[in-house]
Image (cartoon, rainbow, N blue to C red):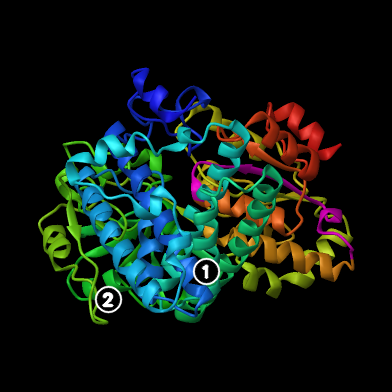
Amino acid sequence: MNSYDYYKGGNSMFCYQCQETARGQGCTVRGVCGKTGDVANLQDLLIYVLKGISMYTTEGRKVAFESKEVNEFIMENLFATITNANFDRNDFIRRITKALEVREDLKNAVANAGGNIDSISHDAANFTIRKEEYDSKAEKVGILATENEDVRSLRELITYGLKGMAAYGKHALNLGYDNNEIHAFLQKALAATLDDSLSVDDLVALTLETGKYGVNVMALLDEANTSTYGHPEITKVNIGVRNNPAILISGHDLKDMEELLEQTKGTGVDVYTHGEMLPANYYPAFKKYDHFVGNYGNAWWKQNEEFEKFNGPILMTTNCLVPPKDSYKDRVYATGSVAFDGIKYIPEAKDGKVKDFSEIIEHAKKCPAPTEIEKGEIIGGFAHNTVFSLADKVVDAVKTGAIKRFFVMAGCDGRMKSRDYYTEFAKALPKDTVILTAGCAKYRYNKLELGDIGGIPRVLDAGQCNDSYSLAVIALKLKEIFELNDVNELPISYNIAWYEQKAVIVLLALLYLGVKNIHLGPTLPAFLSQNVAKVLVENFGIGGITNVEDDLKMFLG
């Protein structure tokens, strides 16, 4: 089925990039995430134009032409199409208009540099259009424009991996860390998803190459975060509240975290993290702020009830926004790639200056203190540097049999009832096992009383989803210590929950590193065709989940 026939059938959109996609097949009227059909289609059109731009950047590199501004533009706009980031139709119209201008300017620049632009004949690189035609064009360039199911599946798998790569690359970029090789690959791969001459085997190879650069971009972000804010430390994080007005900061961007803490210093306004910002509590640089209280709430999908009770304003720095309820919508502020019609937007800083958070700070001063929803502490900060400092202890525990097996339970959380599986799985694990986690999946079990093994907590939280890199580094280090030939010989099992595209690049990175027998849940991705899923099963041992009892028997033998 091509997209034209699909839309003639009365469907307004097609999207299957996240785990919660409708019926496990694809959203066709409105996204489960809350994204409307017209916004979904405009995102498809924006990606289509970015692919056209990437054809010119790839040609430009052949004649030593490269634009830093265009590199950043592609990365930023690809990030904006990730699940739960940007729901604003008008913002996407602006982005598409700008992208078309960038494409034409780039085309001329590459030609002037001696590039062979005449060889670039694809519609994505050449079409012209009026704003009134954006919607009709968008309906013809979406996912289903690729008729071959397996080619479509691989193209989308690559594209979603590139979206995750763009997210991590943008966070690194915000801290002044960049890598031209990452940009070059991202753009080459984007352009390749429109290349009809590539076979299924070619696309499988490109998928693994995407994993390689996924490792590189996560290493870059790790360097950016740790060089700027220090290595995460073992930290007990307060989950209660104080009696001061406060701002809740959610998302992933540590630069925004730093600037908010600095600007709220001495104002009487407290700061709490939420969701994926929890690991900010582990960085030494942020511990000097006495108004940084701790973490409030849980994973992203609970924000409707938790934002209501927080009472003060909320700053969304990246994706994982749930369409806000009217009752607190006026307290939600967005920045970076996040946008939603009717919520306030804090623009990017220019000329090396910082973002201006004065409006949200003044708003906070007028609000009551947060309503307490929990008390106590949770522990985290077990990124690779910390675990390496405990290496002797960990190795002894493995050699003596005190630790029989590690379970990597990184990834994403979501609202589906089926995700209770991960809580029950954690509870049912034998007492001689340790959970390695990163990402918001940890909220399913990081508040359970699972105890420790010889002083080593049974849940080791490495940080955000990008810190899954830490878990890979830890595994490779253990392989070296135990003098093994293959990382799969380690007593490590992988039971990973996924939700959106940052999880996709993490998966591809693990596959590139040679990790096998990864189990994904609560469902396998809808964008994997039967044949592509078969390749992943046969070559990498990718599997799904069933129930706690049977899966434990499978993992533990």
Position of 35 relative to 333 (above/below): above
Q: Nearer the N terminus, badge 2 or badge 1?
A: 1
State left or right for residue 434 relative to residue 224.
Answer: right
Residue beneath the point at 14% across and 68% down: 358
Residue 29 visible in image: yes
Residue 20 screen position, x and y as percent: 47, 32
* Crowdedness near tag 2: few (<14), some (14–19) or many (≥20) residues, C-alpha within 10 Å: few
Find residue 354 and name its label: none
State left or right for residue 395 relative to residue 63.
Answer: right
Residue 149 screen position, x and y as percent: 59, 31
Q: What residue type is labelled 2?
A: Glu
Q: Mark 2 points at which residue?
A: 262
Residue situated furthest front in the rendering: 118
- Name the mark nearer the viewer: 2 or 1: 1
What kind of element bears circle 1? helix
Return the residue nearer the eye: 108 or 534.
108
Q: Name the residue under label 1.
A: 184
* Crowdedness near tag 1: few (<14), some (14–19) or many (≥20) residues, C-alpha within 10 Å: some
- In the rendered image, the quadrant that contains the C terminus is top right
Tell me the distance, in whole angstroms, between the alpha carbons under discs 2 and 1: 35 Å
Residue 385 screen position, x and y as percent: 63, 73
Residue 363 screen position, x and y as percent: 12, 58
Res 355 quadrant in image: bottom left
Residue beneath the point at 45% across and 25% down: 22
Residue beneath the point at 45% across and 71% down: 172
Q: Which amino acid does label 1 sit on?
A: Ala
Range of residues picked out in magenta = 484-501
Position of 363 relative to 109 (above/below): above
